[in-house]
Image: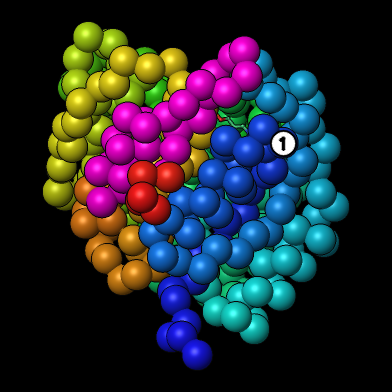
């Protein structure tokens, strides 16, 4: 018998192409030595060219999955990805309270997924407000990219000053920490992410790789951070580890299909 590994739960959607969503989360948990569990929220129909549509899972099935694993197997850290509707978000928030995931309990990462990089909506419009009011106050960490920052706060990040302004605006919604990812900023520069809890301000700088194959990058980074939190790291350490992890995954991304290929955690297994 082997010692039981730490566990992480992803509450997110499926990507039929296998590069993002729960598929990215599970392979990232696995690559980081963490047992991954899933509460599926939606099934997307997609390939490397984009998302063709999605269907959400009935709300009681979403919350049932969370309760089933949390009450029996235990959750050392959790994350959300695609949540699809306000109804699912509201029900997930209530269930997380019941099983003590979030803010004061189990570390909880909210990746506020709104659209794919190909511009397809992954969230019904009215759900953005529910992410702000129901999920952010419960989150240990939120990890928006610049498009999500603009949707959530109206702040257009163009450099360090507006990145800080965005972080301050996001912290107002009540999460403990915010990571404003700068990956979509000026392509000529390094990727600089800004992490803050309102008191400490940490700039994490890393190389930018010349590849179009970045599908699943946001999910993979949030899952890597969640893996580190599951193993007991504090937030700044987990984010630094997540950043190093995603850099290698982008460096080792591969072409697949006629569109955007996925980032890859395979290097960890070599
Ligand atoms: N599909 C699902 C189910 C996702 O959760 C996400 C992102 O979170 C995407 C697609 C989009 O991924 P990307 O923007 O990296 O292409």
Residue 260, position as x, y percentages in the image: 54, 19
Q: Quadrant of residue 52?
A: top right
> Residue at the spot x=36%, y=44% of the render?
267
In front: 179, or 94?
179
Residue 225, position as x, y percentages in the image: 36, 53
Residue 255 is a magenta residue:
yes
Q: Going by the picture, which residue comes out furthest to the front?
A: 270
Residue 165, position as x, y percentages in the image: 26, 27
Locate residue 228 relative to residue 130 in the image: left or right.
left
> Residue at the spot x=31%, y=15% of the render?
210
Q: Going by the picture, which residue comes out furthest to the bottom?
A: 1
253 w.r.t. 13: above or below: above
Q: Secondary structure at mark 1?
A: loop
> Residue at the spot x=64%, y=83% of the render?
72
Q: Quadrant of residue 126?
A: top right
Q: Quadrant of residue 227?
A: bottom left
Image quarter where ligand 1 lies: top right
Residue 212, position as x, y percentages in the image: 44, 16
In front: 49, or 163?
49
Residue placed under numbered mark 1 in the picture: 16
What segment is highlighted magenta in the picture?
241-265
């Amino acid at each position: 018998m082997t010692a039981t590994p730490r566990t992480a739960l992803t509450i997110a959607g499926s990507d039929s192409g296998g590069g993002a969503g729960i598929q990215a989360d599970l392979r990232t948990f696995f690559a980081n030595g963490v047992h991954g569990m899933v509460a599926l929220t939606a099934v997307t129909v997609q390939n490397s060219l984009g998302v063709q549509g999605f269907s959400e899972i009935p709300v009681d099935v979403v919350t049932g999955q969370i309760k089933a694993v949390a009450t029996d197997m235990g959750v050392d850290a959790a994350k959300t990805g695609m949540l699809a509707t306000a109804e699912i978000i509201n029900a997930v928030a209530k269930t997380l309270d019941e099983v003590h995931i979030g803010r004061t309990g189990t570390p909880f990462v909210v990746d506020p997924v709104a659209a794919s990089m190909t511009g397809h909506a992954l969230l019904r419009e009215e759900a953005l407000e529910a992410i702000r009011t129901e999920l952010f106050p419960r989150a240990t960490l939120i990890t928006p990219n610049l498009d999500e920052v603009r949707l959530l706060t109206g702040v257009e990040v163009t450099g360090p000053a507006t990145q800080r302004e965005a972080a301050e605006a996001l912290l107002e919604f009540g999460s403990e920490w915010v990571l404003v990812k700068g990956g979509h900023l000026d392509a000529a520069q390094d990727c600089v992410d800004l992490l803050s809890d309102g008191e400490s301000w940490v700039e994490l700088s890393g190389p930018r790789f010349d590849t179009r194959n970045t599908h699943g990058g946001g999910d993979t980074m949030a899952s890597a951070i969640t893996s580190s939190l599951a193993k007991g790291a504090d937030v700044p350490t987990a984010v630094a580890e997540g950043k190093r992890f995603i850099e290698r995954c982008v460096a080792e991304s591969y072409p697949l299909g006629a569109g955007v290929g996925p980032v890859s955690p395979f290097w960890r297994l070599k």
